Image (tube, rainbow, N blue to C red):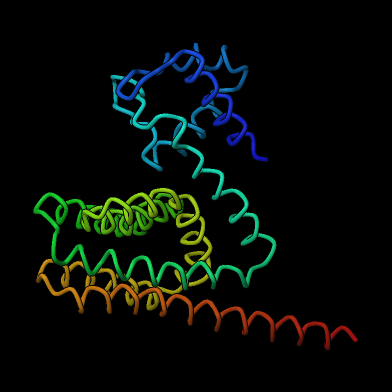
Amino acid sequence: MKVSDKVVQNLRILIEQNNMQVGDRLPAERKLCEQLGVSRSSLREAIQQLTSMGMLLSKVGAGTFLQQLPINWSQHQIVQPLSLLIDQDPAYRFDVQEARTILEGGTAWYAAQRATQEDLQNIRQCYEQISHFQAIGDDEQAAIADAQFHLAIAEASHNLVLIQMMRGLFDLLQFNVVLGRRKVYTEARTYDQLRDQHFQVIDAIERRDPEAARNAVCGHIEFVVQQVRMIDEEEARRQRASRLNRT
């Protein structure tokens, strides 16, 4: 188990022991480190993890607030074993992509029908952040923005079950995006294609075209799957050739 996951568990226990409620502010960072016996970096990683999943809310200059009671954090336990499966079995990521196609096809469909102007602004902001971080070479932040883009579409569906499913799997989604970006985003031409695919999703949602939105997001995910398969096959061929040359 990662250190941050242990910190999450201990943080949950602390919140329960102090009988904190939704909206309550967590103790200051230094005090939390002392109470949990962890470093600031480990604490920050755990808080960021929970914030990205909608369980905590961090406000600049104000602190970190409880968004969801620990009783609902059990969904977090899904992420670690699934991430381990992806690490141990690279082919497993294709199962994740299939699941994304089913889930995100639905969220895009409803987002095209229900998105408010605020939702559209949020989706477009995430899109612009992907381009910004990609341009400055910050792959980690670009991956986060990419995952946030897909989460923003889910939130625009205004279907609470779909939103909870996407939030619950956010870390897994981000992990999957990072793996895909390491392979697919290495060429400028491919990046341009992926950026255009993201734009097509936005355009379909803004035009209130559910079918086009679903097709655009599913086509985007399928494109990534095919690109990763091609890259994996090419890498396997090079490895076989290298072994033959050594014999």
| Residue ID at (33%, 59%) | 150
Q: Nearer the viewer, residue 105 or 244?
A: 105
Quarter containing the N terminus:
top right
Q: Is residue 83 left or right of residue 138?
A: right
User: In which quadrant of the rendered image does the C terminus lie?
Assistant: bottom right
Please report the residue visible at 22 percent of the width from the left and 58 percent of the height from the top.
157
Q: Based on the displayed image, in which of its 4 quarters is residue 156 positioned?
A: bottom left
* Horizontal and vertical percent position of residue 196: 27, 74
Residue lying farthest to the right in this orientation: 247
Location of residue 90 by image quarter = bottom right
Note whether 224 is above or below 133 in the view shown: below
161 or 34: nearer the viewer: 161
Q: Position of residue 129 (x, y in %)?
A: 28, 53
Vertical comparison of 121 with 209: above or below: above
In the rendering, at what x and y percent does residue 73 appear? 47, 37
Query: Total of numbered circles in the picture?
Result: 0
* Residue for point 19% across, 57% down: 124
x and y, in percent, of residue 80 in the image: 59, 48
**As drawn, 215 above or below 13:** below
